[in-house]
Image (tube, coloured by chain):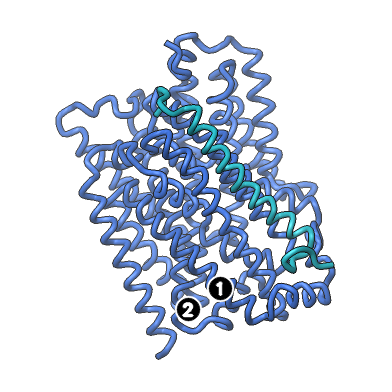
Chain colours: A cyan, B blue
Amino acid sequence: MAGPLGFPWSTFAALVVVVASVVLAVVYALVTGRGRRGGDDE
Amino acid sequence: MSSGVAYATVLALYAAVLIVAGVWTGRRTRSASDFYIGGRQVGPWVTAFSFVAAYFSSVVIVGGGAFGYRFGMSTVWIAASNVFIGCTLAWIVLGRRLWQFSRRLDAMTIPGFIGKRYGSREAQLFSAVIIFLFMIVYNVSVLQGMGRILEGLMGMPYAQGILVSGAVILIYVAFGGYLAVVWTSFLQAWVMLFALILLAVAALSAAGGIHAVNARLAAVDPGLVSTPGVWGWQGLVSYCLIVSLGVWGMPQLLVRFYSMENARVLRLGTVLATLGGAMAVLPYLTGAVSRTLLPALENPDLAIPTLTKTVLNPWGGAVFLAGVLAAGMSTFASVLIIVSAAIVRDLRRPGASDGTDATAPGAAARDVRAGRLASLAAGLVSLAVALRPPALILVVTAFSWAVIASACLWPTVLGVYWKRGTREGAVCSMVAGTATALGWMLAKSPLGIHGFIPGVAVALVVFVIVSLATKPPARELVARAWGES
């Protein structure tokens, strides 16, 4: 049975992992940017 | 206008751009550090997109499409693992540490890092020999992929195809070194992305949209729209791990972290590499769509070339061909630099540390000349072997990745996270991992498990046990690597 956007549910879950990876990368960049700004490894 | 004229025009323009980029960057290459790691001055966009271009070779586009054709929608999980483990986690877990360690230890190569981190010339030599041998094997598979796609789309004889594409790459790598590789890879990543989107949109449109594709695939076999579907968990999980976790031990990708200018490159690069890596979804998805348009293909490897001819006009086909060649060329060029570095920096001068003689008169020019000659030699050997290819493309690729990752993954990952890791642990892990991966594959992969998995598992166990059983590394060695003064 088709899931969201016409993809099978299991394929849609794989696409969610791709989007979640992008979100994780953005959060990582924001958090480390705030914590390290002016640090000794800049 | 005939498709031959369109292909020839687009490819001639494309080759000219690459050669100009090589000559331009060659003017900025004055030292070994410039030739191998771009003088540690590369920014986030170029670092991230050249990482993605080196990661996804023509093998992924043609072979990934073939997997999508054969196994259906479940193969999108391979792309998900590429993005999550191979891009996002690799940058987060390894990026900052490898960048910091390579600077503190003044290392330009992965064997150079391993040798200095563990204080072991044996570990440096062993990893350099493995990289030298199996990276050339990997390059042969990349050349095969380019030769086959030129043969399939343009009707160019296989040998002529690999000689033409190989010659263009050799020119720009020998002139420009790492800077030429990363700048051309940056351009090539965009060409790949555009080409993959073009083919995916045309294929989905021709098939009547994703709903129609799913309905037709389910009618052929319900396993084509479920996970793990017709492939099974064993095959799907094995392949996901090889092409994603394997990245953590592949020198042509890890060296991108050495060349970063500062920590800002790492932060923005993590986001950009993840976004760029998402293009991996397209070949698998397009391969699955092609099953509905070309249901009677005898060889799934022909799915993407045949689909291109079916759904794109000659100019679109020429752009797609440029995208596939871009994927192959960027990987081939990245590997050439790594092999050249293994010869010149790690094998040729025993006892020499990276860059220690940079102040000697004429040393910088000599180093660059040696790098150019070594990359030319490695490229010519790869071309010679590829003229009589030893096996199927994907078999050769998986073979070389399995051996290199089994040797290099844990000494690299644990080398930046575990202070207790010792030189004996590193050397035994590399030897045991390599022997296990090779032995497993020579025994024709018992239980249907690829040699990568037992190779990496044995290498981890041996590294930990031998390290704990031997004397801890010298305090000065650990202090230098971890920046503890």
Q: What chain is tagged by disc 1?
A: B
Considering depth in this image, is B200 or B9 the residue closer to the camera? B200
Residue B76: % across, % down: 69, 59
Crowd rating for badge 2 (residues with CA inside 10 Å; few <14, some 14–19, many 20+): many
Name the image quarter holding the C terminus of chain B.
top left
> Which mark is on residue B185?
none
The number of numbered discs placed on residues in the rendered structure image is 2
Q: What chain is tagged by disc 2?
A: B
- Callout 2 secondary element: helix
The residue to which callout 1 is attached is B199
Q: Disc 1 to disc 2, how far (Cα)?
A: 8 Å
Q: Which of marks 1 and 2 is nearer the N terminus?
A: 1
**Which residue shows up at 38% across the image and 84% down it?**
B5
**Which residue shows up at 42% across the image and 39% down it?**
B265
**Which residue shows up at 59% across the image and 58% down it?**
B280
**Which residue shows up at 60% across the image and 43% down it?**
B246
In the image, residue B197 sits, relative to residue B274, either above or below, namely below
The residue to which callout 2 is attached is B316
| Amino acid at circle 1 | Leu
* Residue B96 in sight from this viewpoint: yes
Both labels 1 and 2 in a single chain: yes
